[in-house]
Amino acid sequence: MTSGEFTLEARCGSARAGTLHLRHGDVMTPCFMPVGTVGTVKFLTPEDLRAAGAKIILGNTYHLYLRPGTEVIDAAGGLGPFMHWDGPILTDSGGFQVFSLSNLNRIEEQGATFRSHIDGSSHLLTPEKAIDIQAVIGSDIMMALDVCPPGNADRETATDAVDRTLRWLIRCQARWDEKVQESGSRAGLLFPIVQGASFADLRLESARRTQELADWAGIAIGGLSVGEPKQVTYEMLEVLEPVLRPDGPRYLMGVGYPDDLVESIRRGADMFDCVAPTRNGRNGTAFTSYGQVNVRKAAFRTDFEPLDPDCQCECCRNYSRAYLRHLFKCGELLGHRLLSVHNVAFLLNLVTRARDEIIAGSFESWAADWLERYRAGP
Amino acid sequence: MTSGEFTLEARCGSARAGTLHLRHGDVMTPCFMPVGTVGTVKFLTPEDLRAAGAKIILGNTYHLYLRPGTEVIDAAGGLGPFMHWDGPILTDSGGFQVFSLSNLNRIEEQGATFRSHIDGSSHLLTPEKAIDIQAVIGSDIMMALDVCPPGNADRETATDAVDRTLRWLIRCQARWDEKVQESGSRAGLLFPIVQGASFADLRLESARRTQELADWAGIAIGGLSVGEPKQVTYEMLEVLEPVLRPDGPRYLMGVGYPDDLVESIRRGADMFDCVAPTRNGRNGTAFTSYGQVNVRKAAFRTDFEPLDPDCQCECCRNYSRAYLRHLFKCGELLGHRLLSVHNVAFLLNLVTRARDEIIAGSFESWAADWLERYRAGP
């Protein structure tokens, strides 16, 4: 198989099971990508991630560009060697963080000028620069620079974002064409991003015009899960599903929570990333087969059962609810680590189970049962 | 071998190599015990500790008594099962933290009344209670409650501490005799503690009177490394070495840094504990064969060598100085974890090496060379 090839193995309703062949290994879809913002999935080693079932992780271009910077990453031979991860990596374009995290000065046709959230230094992120940085990082999948308006954007803002995202995509593609020709290039596949906020016709237009530009190895759906109601996310997925080419993976950016994953797989999405498992883990919130649970709860004081009896992760194999509660009550950061391991493993097990059910043809009924149980709570 | 038996295998000058047979496994000496204050060696799992070479860990009775409390530990079946550590555990008596950490109200003959540093609640720690708590914890080695004056204590304070420590030891021993008779008891061995501050004659008196009381399985040297100059610590060890019974292990409490360990092994001490490896690790300070080093240093920016090329720990096998620097610059707690692993492994490797050199008869020259290299720094 050549890098970027996608094998669609089964469908069940709109849900899909496939395999994406990447330079650093195959990724079975649906897949969840733990987020390693600055070259570390907080608290966890690559060995922890492997043991939890991770096949591909995500890096944030904005953060990595600011720290440690492309010079250090280049000298290390790319992000993988730098952080001791030998599997596939996907990077975002940096745009989302520029819009949400930095002090954004202005967006012009050339690119986005922003000040670093760390030291206030001024930078210009252009489509070309987003590609250049990701080529240094050496991610297996790089993202085109897009304009990502807030979830409640008005029609004009959303239209402008779609148009500029398409113009920037053409520039990204041109730079990417150059980069992949360079000898010793670490440039990976390039995915474009569909925008359009919560306007169905704009989403359709964005998808159509994006797909007309090239035979992309995969396509991302951006600008969702950014403040709009969940029902809107689901509606946009339903609108897009019939028009997105079936022979490539669809990456729903920034999603999500366990039930979001099941709902989105149900609507034809294949790839996901989110800080939810690690961020919630650090807050003491665990995803379990009986719903979300706060491990500080008094009922866990002398409860020596595993956090989730259905889970075989390092946390659930070795530690009790009472011990996890104790760690969080004492502010002991081993608790953050163990709950991060569990939540990541939970999402990875969930997408693996969804894949099995899709292949078995039983996804729809399984998903309905699973969602009911999860939402019922403890 | 019965629990508590100590086999002295080799001597080299005053340095000793032995094996201490404990309920949960054999411990080769000299040994270093990583400190798991509230039932967790900060950031590390028992698997990490095993991989780093740990055979025995230390728990703090004061902290465990306050959180999670004896009721929870008892219900878990002891501290080992609670924290998922199946090896030997040593616990202190709680006295040191009562004197140093709590709001101490008063010390009377009955015991020490203190207020919790967490919630201000009032508690009385008596010799009997120190034994009762440690019996619930189920440590392989429990410590008698002692009075630990500051390193610069005057002669009267030091004399009173020696006398009261001996009277409390008799009460601890009586309670311990009862506890070990109880069916299903988790009470382990009892070690007494020699006090005497920096007064050689008081140290000798404390050791003599302590050893006259019983045929202890081992003996601890307390009240050192509590603010006095290091030279005083070494002098007290030299004073005690000839009078301490050779057929039991000598535990030097709260020591130490790498060079302290070598200096103390040289003077006949066998067992050590200290938070130095983990606390320094969290501060970004690493112990290495070329001295202490701050991993944030600018020279590490693009240095892709392991932290210590002589070390085979998880951190040094998998990560570079540049990556560790990056983690600490970003405040990423994986850095705390990796440096804690390294520093703990460094001390464990150091005592193992010292043991090998003692058995080979080459300890003295090795120790001199090692100290010179370590103290020379990077």
Image (tube, coloured by chain):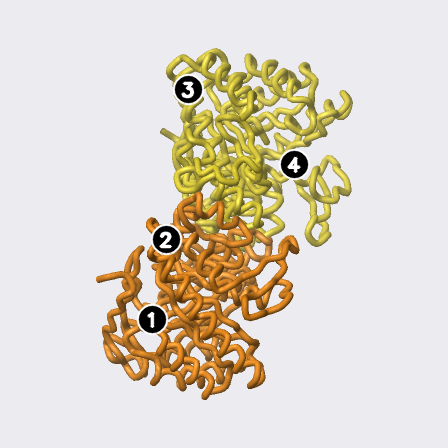
Chain colours: A yellow, B orange
Q: Give the distance between the C-alpha atoms of the residues marked 1 and 2, in whole angstroms.
A: 18 Å
Name above or below for residue A267 compared with residue A67: above
The residue at which mark 3 appears reads as: A8
The x and y percentages for residue B239 are 40, 86
Judging depth in this view, the residue of A131 and B211 nearest the camera is: B211
Question: On the same chain: label 3 and label 1?
Answer: no
Question: On the same chain: label 3 and label 4?
Answer: yes
**What kind of residue is marked 2?**
Arg
**What chain letter is assigned to the residue under label 2?**
B
Categorize mark 3 by other alpha carbons within 10 Å: few (<14), some (14-19), many (20+). Answer: some
The residue depicted at 30 percent of the width and 60 percent of the height is: B22
Comparing marks 1 and 4, which lies closer to the viewer?
Answer: 1
The residue depicted at 50 percent of the width and 34 percent of the height is: A33
**What kind of residue is marked 4?**
Phe
Q: Give the distance between the C-alpha atoms of the residues marked 1 and 4, in whole angstroms.
A: 66 Å
Q: What is the quadrant of residue A170 in the picture?
A: top right
The residue at which mark 4 appears reads as: A96
The residue at which mark 2 appears reads as: B186
Q: Which type of secondary structure does the marked residue at label 1 adopt?
A: loop
Q: Give the distance between the C-alpha atoms of the residues marked 3 and 4, in whole angstroms.
A: 29 Å
Q: Which type of secondary structure does the marked residue at label 2 adopt?
A: loop
Comparing marks 4 and 2, which lies closer to the viewer?
Answer: 2
Asked if the residue at tag 4 contacts the one at tag 1, i.e. Cβ–Cβ closer than 8 Å, the answer is no
> Residue A76, can we see it?
no
The x and y percentages for residue B360 are 23, 76
Q: Give the distance between the C-alpha atoms of the residues marked 4 and 2, in whole angstroms.
A: 57 Å
